Image (cartoon, grey):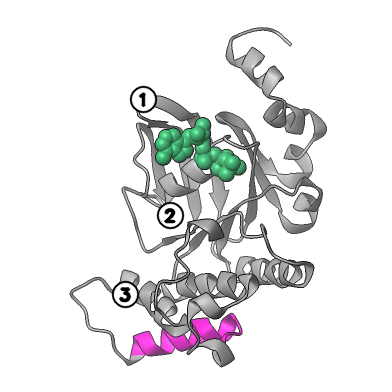
Amino acid sequence: MSTHALQIRDLTVSYTRIPALHHIEFEVRCGQCVALLGPNGAGKTTLLKTLAGLVAREAGTIHFHGREVRGATPDIAYLPQRGQIDWDFPTTVRGLVEMGRYLRLGWWRKYGPTDAAAVDGAIHSMNLEALQDRQISALSGGQQQRAFLARALAQEAHVLLLDEPFTGLDKPNQDTLKLTLRQLREQGKLLLVSHHDLPSVREIFDQVVLLNGELIAAGPTKETFTEPNIHRAYDTRIFSAVDHGVAV
Ligand code: ATP
């Protein structure tokens, strides 16, 4: 199994000069399923979008497999929150998955049989064969998630950034997604998943990153997903006291 690392060092991101993330540092590796946790506004989406090259950083570095990541790279795929996607965009499941292939190909190489085989493989592994000609607007929430995961697989991304993928899914689809995440981790993918359902963290994730503007803690779930760390991340009163140098 690959152990390529994603290393984030001293990362600061601001929107119109108001910092959303301050001096974030942690390292995660391929073959891990990582929960990105924190209250509303903690900066989870900002972190995922920055890693995907969709939001500019103010300071800090991001390295994947020893190489500096500057902007978007096919190695890293971002799956937005469902509400941010235009589901009426006229494309089929297969068309969506092919887009992942074009991201890997670049504009100068022609789509060929190897690409079609990669798309077939991605559709097969997400169990979407029967739905591949269907418009994405006519899929269930769980099927839509799987279509976007298939696009990331066709892209041959090593790092999958998932923004609240469990939100809005019913129990059977949540269970299918849990299984899919486990399979992708076993294939050596690095999964970084923003998540709001704290009771399910231990079941799904082997690592956690706790955020609240700053990094609260990062590491194996057993050691990091502890009561004091959860309180520090979610208790904004304590957080803002700490932020202002007040002892608590
Ligand atoms: P949630 O759990 O509610 O989705 P989050 O942890 O993903 O929240 P972000 O969406 O990353 O948090 O937001 C972090 C901070 O940055 C918030 O204070 C938010 O208001 C601010 N923010 C996010 N996007 C923008 C933007 N495009 N312009 C200005 N400020 C923004």
Q: Give the camera-side residue of 200 and 166.
A: 166
The reply to whether the C-beta atoms of the residues labelled 1 and 2 are less than 8 Å apart is no
Residue 26 covered by magenta stretch: no
Q: Is residue 84 visible?
A: yes
- Left or right side of 183 for 79: left
- Left or right side of 74 for 242: right
Q: Which residue lies furthest to the front in this view?
A: 88
Callout 3: SS? helix
Residue beneath label 3, please?
A: 102
Dot 3 crowding, Cα within 10 Å, few <14, some 14–19, many 20+: some
Image coordinates of residue 61 in percent, x first then y, are: 38, 38
Q: In which quarter of the image is residue 77?
A: bottom left
Nearer to us of marks 1 and 2 is 1
What is the C-alpha distance between the residues marked 2 and 3?
A: 22 Å
Q: Quadrant of the N terminus?
A: bottom right
Lower sequence index among marks 2 and 3:
2
- Magenta residues? 114-128
Lower sequence index among marks 1 and 3:
1
**Residue type highlighted by circle 1:** Arg
Residue beneath label 1, please?
A: 17
> What residue is drawn where x is 73% and y is 38%?
224
Q: Can you tell which mark lies on residue 65? A: 2
